[in-house]
Amino acid sequence: MKAAIAADPSKESRAKEEEEEEEDPVELRRGPWTVEEDGLLTYSIACHGEGHWNSLAKAAGLKRTGKSCRLRWLNYLKPDIKRGNLTPQEQLLILELHSKWGNRWSKIAANLPGRTDNEIKNYWRTRVQKQARQLNMESSSQRFIDAIRCFYMPRLVEKEQNNSSCSLPNSTAMNLDGSTYSLTTHQTAMAQQIGNNSSPSNLSSTLLPGTSYHQTSPYPTFGETVYDTRTKMDSLLLDVCYHMDSSDYDAELTAMSATRGSDDQPSDSQVAESNWLGDEIADDMWNLDDLWQFKK
DNA sequence: AAAACTTGCAACCGCGCTTCT
DNA sequence: CAGAAGCGCGGTTGCAAGTTT
């Protein structure tokens, strides 16, 4: 802490101000939490419950602000916090909810049990925004969500399935809620039809017409709160989308690359349009997670 | 092998809203 | 009703770990 303050004079003055504000002359700790501090905080919350964080910190004998204690508890120590990578379903849900609500991280997190607003915010800033930049898209745009949903997510799901010891049978598609079911004959036929139709615009309008195919409950259910189950059409379309064969993805991408504008001086929108999954950008995006080479 | 660079994420900060006194 | 305290949110920073050169 002192080293950090020494490196930044503004921090020094801020720290002094905070010291003056504190009635208690005891110097407050900052930076990473120790195991002992975690234990003290956890025990104190077990005894007194959450809330009144300042007094809780004092009661626990922690040289931390109440704010810091609250943050540590909510983002790290709370028992129901889910650790590890976000599932494809969670990632897609984040994209969709962000397109709806913007940077309302806590609101988004409320729909992903076990995930914190901080975690989602970090995910968004480090992964999503980066990939959106590479695609020259708005990260909250429907177009970007469609790209993720149609090409990134199926591969991610497929890769996860391949990595798991008990791989799912070919006829099994994954729902957004994590459950699986087999494709019906109708769904398989749709998948084939889509596979045969490699125009990206057709794909987009058929599979992912923006929010138009969302009815009153556009988002998947997580746990038992907030969202109704998605419509049958959602289910059908998404599962068909997930179930497309890798050769179909390749065909789609080839077609998408071919649709890039041919004008010498394209407009801005045309630039964005033409960069849409163009060779280099697509490679950047998918190579990022080693997905593009997957199953090639 | 080591320096430089990048990435991911825990933690901090300021601000605004709500509740309490 | 006003000021203080508590709380929660979104933005930002700092650093350890990983990767590249």
Image (cartoon, coloured by chain):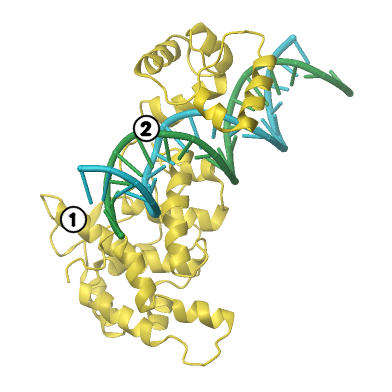
Chain colours: A yellow, B cyan, C green
* Amino acid type of the residue tagged 1 in the rendering: Gln
Pick whichever of labels 1 and 2 is earlier in the sequence: 2
Where is residue A90 drawn, in percent x and y?
A: 37, 50
Which one is in front, A87 or B4? B4
Tell me which residue sits at (42%, 82%) in the image.
Answer: A201
Tell me if residue A20 comes above or below residue C1 in the rendering: above
A204 lies left or right of A4? left
* Circles 1 and 2 in contact, beta carbons < 8 Å: no
Residue farthest along the left direction in this orientation? A165
Tell me which residue sits at (57%, 11%) in the image.
Answer: A55
Which one is in front, A168 or A8? A8
Circle 1 residues within 10 Å: few <14, some 14–19, many ≥20: some
Task: Write down the chain letter for disc 1.
Answer: A
Task: Using the rendered image of the protein, determine whether residue A213 is visible from the camera's viewpoint.
Answer: no
Task: Write down the chain letter for disc 2.
Answer: A
Q: Which quadrant holds residue A169?
A: bottom left
Q: CA distance from mark 1 to mark 2?
A: 24 Å
The residue identified by callout 1 is A161
Where is residue A225 drawn, in percent x and y?
A: 44, 41
- Quadrant (top left/top right/bottom left/bottom right) for the C terminus of chain A: bottom left
Where is residue A272 drawn, in percent x and y?
A: 51, 77
Tell me if residue A258 comes above or below residue A31 in the rendering: below
The residue identified by callout 2 is A81
Q: Which quadrant holds residue A43?
A: top left
Tell me which residue sits at (47%, 9%) in the image.
Answer: A60
* Amino acid type of the residue tagged 2 in the rendering: Ile
Tell me which residue sits at (63%, 31%) in the image.
Answer: A9
**Mark 2 element type:** loop
Q: Are marks 1 and 2 on the same chain?
A: yes
